[in-house]
Amino acid sequence: MSELKTYQIRCPRCRQEQPAGLYESINVKTDPDLRQKLMANAINVVRCEGCELSFRVDKPLLYHDPSRRIMIYLVPMADDAVENSERLFAQLLMNLENVLPAEVRPPTIGLVFNRTELVERIFLLEAGLNERIIEYLKYLLFTRNADRLNPARKELLFNAEDSTAESLCFVVQDVATRKLEAMLKYDRGVYATLAEMFDRDEQTPRLLELFPGPRISARALLLKELGREPASPES
C-alpha cells in the first residue's frame, strides 16, 4: 500500500510553515488514482495556507506497480552528488539481499534522479520495453547526430504515445528551456534485434558495460565521457 507521512513544510514565497502530508511511496495497484496524479505533476504538491501558492516538494519517492513488477526509486539529486548517491543505492540493495531469506529473490528497483526520468521509465516499462536497450538506442542517436544533439544542451525522451508497431519515437528536449523541439523515430525492428541479441535479461556484457546501473542514462554516460556535468531536464 501507499505510504503518506506528515512533514513541516515552509512556503518558498511567504515562508509560512504548515504540516503537509507527503508520499513516501505510492502503490498504483492499491491506489490507481495516484498514477494519474503523478502524471499530472500533482504528487507531493502543497498549497500554502497563507499566500495560497501551490508548489511541489521534491523528495525521495518509491513508485510501485506490483501488477507489472515495476519498482522505481526517485531520489531528487543535485548533479554533483550523483555518483555518491549511486554508491549508496547499491549498498542499500546489497543490504536488502543480506536480510532476505536465501530462497527469496530481491526485487529489481530502478533508480532515477528527477520526475522526468521517473515518468519516462514508467511509460517504457509499461510498454514492455527494456530500459537498457532504450538507453542504448538513445546513445546511438546522440553519437550519430552529434552535430544536432549535443548532450550538454539536449535530452532525448522516450515517447510512448506516438510510438507504433513499426517505430519507437523519441522527443528532443532543450535542457535549458525545457522546450520540446523535434521528434526522432527509430525502427522498432532494430529494437527487436537488439532484444534478441541481448536475450532481454540484461546480462549481456556490452549493455552492462555501458549501463552498469543502478541509474541507466545515455545522456549521463555521454556527459561523463565528455567530462561535463549534466543539467537537469526537470519540469
Image: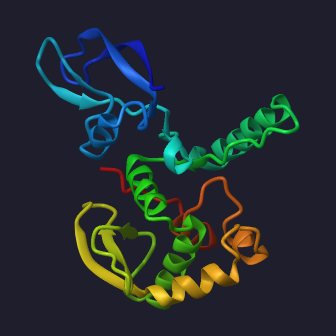
Up-down relation of residue 208 to residue 33 (above or below): below
Q: Tell me what residue is drawn at x 68 percent, y 41 percent.
A: 89
Which residue occupies the foreground of this view, 121 or 65?
65
Q: Tell me what residue is drawn at x 37 percent, y 31 percent.
A: 31
Q: Position of residue 79 (x, y in %)?
A: 52, 49
Q: Tell me what residue is drawn at x 59 percent, y 88 percent.
A: 193
In the rendered view, does 167 fall on the left or right side of 74? left
Q: Say which quarter of the image contains residue 174.
A: bottom left
Which residue occupies the foreground of this view, 130 or 102?
102
Q: Position of residue 169 (x, y in %)?
A: 35, 78
Q: Say which quarter of the image contains residue 30.
A: top left
Q: Position of residue 200 (x, y in %)?
A: 66, 71
Residue sitting farthest toward the left? 51
User: How is colour applied across the structure in the image?
Assistant: rainbow
Q: Position of residue 82 (x, y in %)?
A: 60, 48
In the rendered view, does 149 fall on the left or right side of 96? left
In the rendered view, does 28 fall on the left or right side of 43? right
Up-down relation of residue 221 to residue 125 (above or below): below
Up-down relation of residue 197 to residue 6 (above or below): below
